[in-house]
Image (cartoon, rainbow, N blue to C red):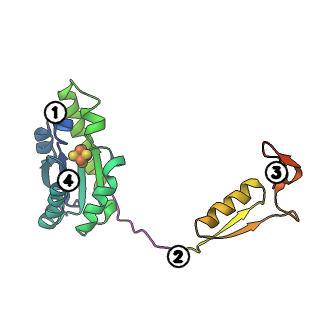
Amino acid sequence: MSNGLPRTGVFVCDCGLNIAGTVDTKTVAAFAEKLPGVACVVHNRYTCADPGQNEIRDAIAEHKLERIVVASCTPRIHETTFRACVESAGVNPYLMEMANLREHCSWVHVGEPEAATHKAMDLIASAVARAQRLQPQIEPKIKVQQAVLVIGGGVAGIQAALDIADGGLQVYLVEKEPSIGGLMAQLDKTYPTMDCSI
Ligand code: SF4
């Protein structure tokens, strides 16, 4: 703990010029150093690349980090990347938080570097505060039976049962009527082949 808060590491990404072309990332990194509980700040060129991820692992070991904030891009792209990265360094993956300096700052505030930089600092301060309130989570592994119950033996149920069986799973097809086929079974011929409906 640092000042009673979890020891937090902040990793500020340039994304080449994608972020650093608009956001003053040096100023942002210097700002992050003064936030409560922050034990280390690392400024990366490309945080998701192997050297950037190695810097995260090294900093976790060196500074005994308990929470990680990656200030880079949208979590939709790299949340799983950074969760796996911190987990490989012995930190629960759910103790990693992201601040989006690219889609939410540099890309939407092109031509407004000051505003983009201020917004980046706000987002990092919020992410640090949020990270420090995170609790570790465990993903339980539950054994499931590799079989599927399909209810209804109409055309949709029959096709679903066949597709699932083709996928290699055991299928139980349940139909309340004495025969399968549903409404299609009531049609004598189907267009254009004039086949029997089932
Ligand atoms: S982590 Fe995101 S913002 Fe940083 S270099 Fe990779 S893609 Fe770009």
Say which of marks 1 and 4 sits in front: 4
Q: Are marks 4 and 3 in contact (CB under 8 Å)?
A: no
- Quarter of the figure with residue 27: top left
Residue 59 on the magenta segment: no
Depth order, front residue of 173/186: 186
Residue 118's disc number: none
Sequence-first tag of 2 and 3: 2
C-alpha separation, residue under disc 1 versus residue under disc 3: 66 Å
Say whether residue 72 is visible.
no
Q: CA distance from mark 4 to mark 2?
A: 35 Å
Q: Nearer the viewer, mark 2 or mark 3?
A: 3
* Residue at mark 2 to residue at mark 3: CA–CA distance: 44 Å
How far apart marks 1 and 2 lie (CA) works out to 49 Å
Disc 1/disc 4 C-alpha distance (Å): 19 Å
Residue at image point 38% right, 65% down: 137
* Residue visible at 70% across and 57% down in the picture: 159
Label placed on residue 195: 3
Magenta-highlighted residues? 134-143
The quadrant of the image that shows the N terminus is bottom left
Ligand 1 within 8 angstroms of badge 4 C-beta = yes
Q: Quadrant of residue 58?
A: bottom left
**Which labelled disc corresponds to residue 21?**
1
Tell me the quarter of the picture where residue 31 sits: top left
Residue type beneath disc 3: Asp
Residue at horizontal 72 percent and vertical 54 percent from the top: 156
